[in-house]
Image (cartoon, grey):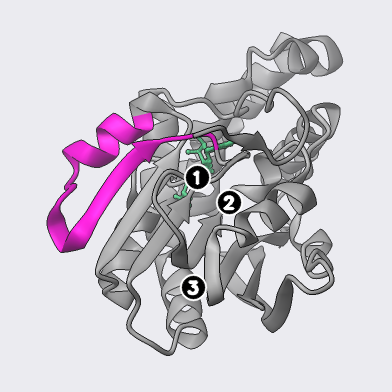
Amino acid sequence: MATRQGAGSRPPRYLFGDSDVAAHRLHVLSEVFADSSRRFLRAATPDRLGLAVDVGCGPGYTTRLVADVLRPLRTVGIDRSEAFITEARRAGAGDNGVSYLVHDAAAVPFPVGPADLIYARFVATHLRDPAATIRSWATQLVPGGLLLLDEVDSISTTNRVLSRYLTILTALLGHQGNSLYVGPTLSNIAGPGLLRSKIDTVRRLRVPDRRAATMFRLNLETWRDHPFVADTYGADAIRRLADELETEAGAAGAASTTEWGMRQIAFERL
Ligand SMILES: C[S@@+](CC[C@H](N)C(=O)[O-])C[C@H]1O[C@@H](n2cnc3c(N)ncnc32)[C@H](O)[C@@H]1O
């Protein structure tokens, strides 16, 4: 069957890659954000579902979360990365009706049939045209089906090291035409006659600075050699930042100056 690119011709490379380090970061992230996502899934989804699709599933942490919390008959994780899909399958395809497919989320139709629910977490930041692509996902839902978005709205911190990391990452994503804080742009994407907003809220989440530093340190490893980073900040400054993040990550205690705002939106397909 012919597929249609939802936005633009060639999707951008996923900036954070699919190395073992990138997968490890997603494991840490899955622990930090599980509770927030679990609450959202429960609040948004009243009925037992037939098919749920987790778009941009990575190594499958969110797919397994959707399956555990909502118990759909089938839950399919799709991701463009073969390495992540292999890792996801290794961690437990078949359990709870879970399966995985390599597929570019910017191309519809998805090769799984109409879904009762589509979920995406930490994905919109990486799309070339989030609004157009996400609208194209709505066409993959049955009427009355739900599209759930769980994306970064804000990150605030008074920690100097974490703050510097965020400044650099924001610039790098901006250089690619993407936004770390994509949440605020997602509220108004419902096209006329296609989607209706059911939930639109920001869930605030305190994260210990050392946990944030652990995630940031792992993520820095995946993009520190990007030419934009080297040219703009210089290798020495990035090396220093890596060392300082390492120190923060190893600090004792659960002190926190850092808060994520997660934009959680549920659209219903008309
Ligand atoms: C930050 S990870 C989030 C993974 C997972 N949703 C989670 O929260 O743990 C973003 C994922 O989106 C995937 N991705 C990015 N662009 C994609 C695209 N166009 N099609 C499919 N997957 C994509 C990446 O490969 C990566 O696995």
Looking at the image, can residue 118 be seen? yes
* Quadrant, the C terminus: bottom right
Write down the residue under mark 1. Answer: 56
User: Camera-side residue: 216 or 243?
Assistant: 216
Q: Secondary structure at mark 1?
A: loop
Q: Is residue 203 above or below residue 21?
A: below
Q: Secondary structure at mark 3?
A: helix
Q: Is mark 2 within 8 Å of ligand 1?
A: yes
Q: Residue at x 41, y 23 (%)?
A: 19
Looking at the image, can residue 253 be seen? no
Write down the residue under mark 3. Answer: 36
Q: Is residue 232 left or right of residue 157?
A: right
Write down the residue under mark 2. Answer: 122
What's the amino acid at mark 1? Answer: Gly
For label 1, the crowd category at 10 Å Cα-Cα, with few meaning under 14, some 14 to 19 and many 20 or more, is: many
What's the amino acid at mark 3? Answer: Ser
Q: Is mark 1 within 8 Å of ligand 1?
A: yes
Q: CA distance from mark 3 to mark 1?
A: 18 Å
Q: Are marks 2 and 1 in contact (CB under 8 Å)?
A: yes
